[in-house]
Amino acid sequence: MKARLMLFCGALLAAMVGVGSDSYAANIDGYKKIKFGITQQALKKQHPCSIIFDKPDAAGIITAYCTDFSFNGSETYATFHLIDGKLLRISILAGDSYTDFMSVGKGLVGKYGKADTGAPQSVNAYEEGQVNEIKLTWDPGVLLAMHRSSGGNQMVSVIYSDARYVDLYQAAKQKLMGKDL
């Protein structure tokens, strides 16, 4: 029975991963009404949740979070990352089970098409404890991951990022270290 379930889940995950032009994800501009590039003040006004802003770190990066963010029909934990005063990344805790991972994955496929990258063969390895993470990505801008901690707890997360996030994050950190790009 377990082997049949793993085979079904592996086939379903394989169906989520694109291998050609079947994928149609465009540049991600945010999550629902929360758009990348908005300021801290605009994010506060939108009230996506009871948001709390940390003070900027030494590189000027601001992290904000809330525990009552609405996602997939329930309230969950979300983190917002602002660089140079602009929102560029939203990370959402999307569940704690393989069922949650598959449910969110189906929703992302419905919105963005098949994933650009992912490892369907890693499903069995994950279930057998050989790997501790499964990832699917929609380029640019969406990552769905399931991670198992050393204690056995699982966490499903979905991350929406502006296409410039990595470059701007690295630039902020390098500026802090006094290095030119």
Image: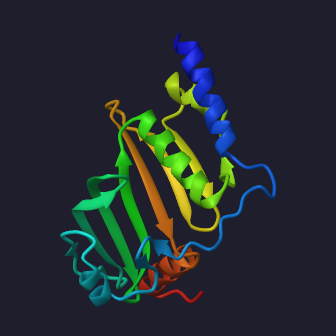
Q: Nearer the viewer, residue 156 or 34?
A: 34
Residue 40's place in the image compared with 53, above or below, is below
> What colour scheme was applied to this rendering of the protein?
rainbow
- Relative placement, left or right, of 124 versus 14 is left
List x then y, in percent, for residue 178. Answer: 47, 88
List x then y, in percent, for residue 129. Answer: 49, 25
Q: From the image, which quarter does the C terminus lie in?
A: bottom right
Q: Residue at x 39, y 35 (%)?
A: 97
Q: Residue at x 37, y 74 (%)?
A: 81
Residue 46's place in the image compared with 142, above or below, is below
Q: Nearer the viewer, residue 41 or 107?
A: 107
Residue 94's place in the image compared with 2, above or below, is below
List x then y, in percent, for residue 109. Answer: 60, 52
Q: Nearer the viewer, residue 131 or 137?
A: 137
List x then y, in percent, for residue 25. Answer: 66, 65
All told, the count of numbered labels is 0
Rendering quarter of residue 22 = bottom right
Residue 154's place in the image compared with 52, above or below, is above
Q: Residue at x 52, y 14 (%)?
A: 2
- Relative placement, left or right, of 98 versus 20 is left
| Residue most extreme to the top | 1
